[in-house]
Amino acid sequence: MHTAAIPASVVELTETLSALPGIGPKTASRLAFFLLRGKSDLALRLAEALKGLVERTRFCSICYNVTEAARQLGLAREHVYYYLNKYGIRRPD
């Protein structure tokens, strides 16, 4: 019986997904083929959401809340406002 080789992109996605907590190789393979068979907009939306997560979101270095505020500073919005008030800088309206 002849079996087709799995494309490298599917193997790479499966390996990447299986690195997530709670997702083993079997579940990762199912997810990869689900995304491959499904509508391409879901896979693209997922890719954009992951890109946004990495580019715009981080943990606050003080309270460890997840934040998009003050990405460059690594602080949650509350801490940015705290320091603005502490040093007498007016908040933006």
Image: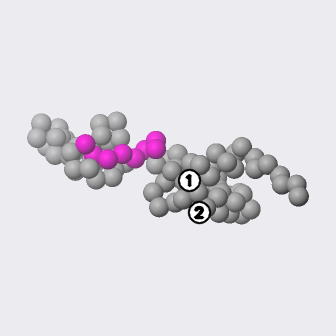
In contact (CB < 8 Å): disc 2 and disc 1? yes
Relative side of 50 to 9, left or right: left
| Secondary element at image label 2 | helix
Q: Quadrant of residue 30?
A: bottom right
Earlier in the chain: of badge 2 and badge 1, it is 1
Relative side of 7 to 23, left or right: right
19 or 61, nearer to the observer: 19
Numbered mark located on residue 88 in the image: none
**Residue found 49% across the figure and 47% down from its top:** 52
66 or 82, nearer to the observer: 66
**Residue beneath disc 2:** 27
Crowd rating for badge 1 (residues with CA inside 10 Å; few <14, some 14–19, many 20+): some
Q: Is residue 27 among the parts visible in the rendering?
A: yes
Relative side of 49 to 11, left or right: left
Crowd rating for badge 2 (residues with CA inside 10 Å; few <14, some 14–19, many 20+): some
Q: Report the magenta residues as a range.
A: 54-61
The spot of residue 15 in percent (x, y) is 59, 49
The spot of residue 73 in percent (x, y) is 29, 36
**Residue beneath disc 1:** 17
Relative side of 35 to 88, left or right: right
**Residue found 67% across the figure and 48% down from its top:** 11
| Secondary element at image label 1 | helix
Q: Quadrant of the N terminus?
A: bottom right
**Residue found 40% across the figure and 47% down from its top:** 57
**Residue found 56% across the figure and 48% down from its top:** 16
Measure the C-alpha gap from mark 2 to mark 1.
9 Å
